[in-house]
């Protein structure tokens, strides 16, 4: 495989790591930096589709208020790069505590479309589905 292909795959993994770090640090600016301006975030299990980075970040900030504690880890299972576009499937392992103190441990899958903008990889579409748990 060409060296640039491996470099792109590594950069996409780092994008996923940055997304998780944003969640774990509750850092809306960091988390928001992983999305392109015209991105789409789909949560079919909740019948939610949010369009545009600003609305995605606002929705995330509102959702995070429900959880005094969240820890998210994710690992890619598949990454395919074609030029400035990529597809990734990743798996999440989360621990969260709700406002009433209930601990939840959802496991999920993201199916992603990524684009390279000005040399940086960003999410253009993320579709989440619950595999197990809340």
Image: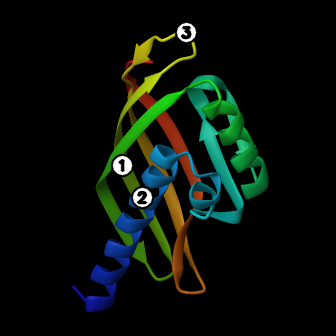
The single residue placed furthest to the left in the displayed view is 1
Colour pattern: rainbow
- Quadrant including the C terminus: top left
Disc 2, SS: helix
In the rendered image, which quarter is residue 3 located in?
A: bottom left
Indicate the secondary structure of the residue bearing disc 3: loop
* Residue placed most toward the observer, 77 or 14: 14
The mark found on residue 16 in the picture is 2
Which residue is denoted by mark 1 in the rendering?
90
Residue 85 appears at what percent x and percent y?
Answer: 51, 73
Contact, mark 2 vs mark 1 (Cβ under 8 Å): yes
Q: Is residue 124 above or below residue 101?
A: below
Query: Which one is earlier in the sequence, the residue at label 3 or at label 1?
Result: 1
Image quadrant occupied by the N terminus:
bottom left
Residue drawn at x 67%, y 26% is 47
Whether the residues at callouts 3 and 1 have beta carbons within 8 Å, the answer is no
Relative to 2, say whether 60 is above or below.
above
Cα distance between the residues tagged 3 and 1: 30 Å
Q: Give the camera-side residue of 87 and 60.
A: 60
The earlier-in-sequence mark between 3 and 2 is 2
């Amino acid at each position: 495989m060409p060296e640039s292909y491996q470099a792109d795959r590594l950069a996409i993994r780092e994008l996923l790591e940055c997304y998780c770090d944003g969640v774990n640090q509750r850092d809306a600016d960091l988390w928001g930096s992983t999305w392109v301006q015209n991105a789409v975030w789909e949560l079919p299990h909740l019948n939610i589709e949010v369009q545009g980075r600003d609305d995605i970040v606002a929705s995330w900030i509102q959702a995070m208020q429900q959880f005094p504690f969240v820890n998210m880890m994710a690992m890619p299972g598949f990454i395919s790069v074609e030029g400035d576009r990529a597809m990734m499937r990743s798996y999440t392992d989360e621990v969260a505590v709700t406002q009433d103190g209930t601990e939840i441990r959802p496991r999920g899958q993201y199916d992603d479309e990524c684009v390279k903008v000005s040399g940086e990889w960003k999410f253009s579409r993320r579709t989440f589905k619950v595999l197990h748990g809340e």
